[in-house]
Image: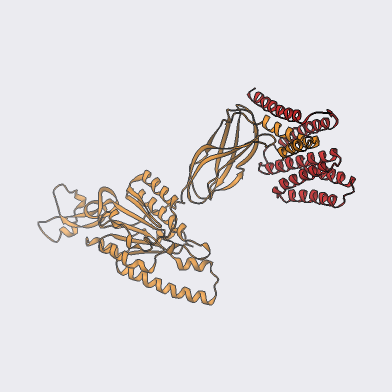
Chain colours: A orange, B red
Amino acid sequence: MMYLLILAGIVTVYGDFITLALPLAVYLLAGYLFSAEEIKLEATRHLSLERTSPNSEVTVTVTVRNHGSHLAELLLEDNLPADLSIRFGHTRHLIQLAKDSSYTFTYRVAGPRGGYGFESVRARINDPLRVTSREVQLEAKGQLFVFPPVTRLRHVAIRPRRTRVYAGLIPARVGGTGTEFYGVREYHPGDPPRAINWRASAHEEDVLYSNEFQQERVADVGIILDGRLLTNEFAHGHSLFEYSVQAAAALADALLSQGNRVGLLVYAAYLRWTIPGYGKIQREKILFSLAHARAGGSNVFADLEHLPTRLFPSESQIILVSPLHENDLNPLVQLRARGYQVLVVCPNPVKFELSYLSKNRNVKLAARVIQMERTLLLQNMRRAGIQILDWDVAEPFDLVVKRRLSHPPAWLRAVGTIGL
Amino acid sequence: MTLIAFVLSVMAGTGSLAYGYSLKGLTDPVRWFVLLGIVWILSHWRKYYWVSTLAFFLTLLGAAFGVWFRFITFWMLLGALGGLLGWDLSDFGMRLSYAAPTDDIQGMERRHLERAGIVALLGLGLALISLYIHIERLPFEIAVGLVLLAALGLTRLVWGLRRY
């Protein structure tokens, strides 16, 4: 506009146009004059915690140093990852920053389960009149992992057919040293006297019998977390997936604490496989994988037919955490037929949906029908030798596990004794 | 502080234009300028900051139109200056809305008002000087040459000061 006025003044040979343009010219000139000559900013970030639990607050501290010229107006905005919410403080600040000085701001964030990457801080540098404006992204990386809450489980009784060679807590179906009675065999020289079964030995004159205990070893456990939209997502944005993740985390933690070798497969829009391992590092890996687990749908993994069973050692324990779908029966029976010991931890979708639906007659009738279908499905699975833990998510998972999984069921113990 | 300055600038700008036009007996434009001022202030209050740019353009257009039709230049000049300050303060108000409550907002406001005030006074002073100092019989070619020379000089001045 200023140039137009000057042009008009020159063309019309009328000086008042130029007079009108003079304040604008002074304004522009002042803006250019006071604009920053050299922009040299550096940002650093510090997170009070890098691993946390859902909705726990983490303090983020960002420091911006100015190694360039004086900045009269600097707008800083930290690019916050989606899903994180600010609990205290602000991510955006308007400041002036003198040469060779720094500015630090802090804020507290919290968020749901997930992995969050902080990338950069946006800096917009204006001259005092904002005639010139420049924007730069200052790299300030940071990572925050919000792990799922891990419920401590005292003991999870599993009985895979095959165990590994290392000592552990899983009955190995092999006689030896242990705590659980396994059988009676003929006395061997070297057996401690307290191992002699005097009652059995009294039946014969020349033979002594010793008690044999079941060896306890570690086992291979594969946890499959079902993240299919088909089974997890319900109307009005309700989802069972978070409960499934919590159950998977608790089971992985408990089984690793028992010394087992545990792997995790997230079966959702794609497969996310955590290679089996032992100990605390494996616990971290599994929690890391669970932090990133998202429910998703795909045509390929719509049912469990494409479950990559080769990932799991033969005759090992498989724990499927899934609300289950009616089409899941055959794949699970096939798993069982291949020799895997299958435990299905099943967050109950019927009770979950009923908890937020209105309790009218139609809903109750529909719930009854679906519950009957589901009971039938679970019965068929049990008949195939699949262990089922039907979990009403309104109840704490640790209580359910304590009640139902702290000892193997009678039929499984019987199977274990005859050494199948 | 900025809000008060903004309202005063808009009132001064649109008021000057309205007064300048009313001196020539034009009543309709007067109403339009008053309406423009009210709409400008209300839109700033409602945070429609884009209206500011449009309003600034309209005030400049009004001032240029007035100058073209030989209205009193002083009032047109005040109108343009008020428009410029109103636009600047509206934009600054928008930038201030990005600031956190813990930031030194008052300090920034004070510094900005000082700078904008000095720039406005300087612009007004230069414009007033140009209004009252007339060089008779200045050929057009010389005027163009002077303008180009001034532009070159200003550019060199800016470069020199920036290096310093």
Residue A282 appears left or right of A195: right
Residue closest to the eye, A203 or A415 = A415
Q: Quadrant of the N terminus of chain A?
A: top right
Residue closest to the eye, A277 or B60 = B60
- On screen, residue A319 above or below B153: below
**Which residue is painted at 76% across and 49% down in the image?**
B40
- Image quarter for residue B9? top right
Residue A160 appears left or right of A363: left
Q: How many marks?
A: 0
- Image quarter for residue A299? bottom left
Q: Position of residue A117 (x, y in %)?
A: 49, 44
Q: Position of residue A269 (x, y in %)?
A: 41, 57
Answer yes or no: is residue B4 visible: no
Going by the picture, which residue comes out furthest to the left?
A206
Answer yes or no: is residue B63 visible: yes
Q: Quadrant of the C terminus of chain A?
A: bottom left
- On screen, residue A309 above or below B86: below
Residue closest to the eye, A204 or A186 = A186
Residue closest to the eye, A251 or A245 = A245
Q: Position of residue A244 (x, y in %)?
A: 43, 58
Q: Position of residue A147 (x, y in %)?
A: 46, 49
**Which residue is painted at 29% across and 60% down in the image?**
A341
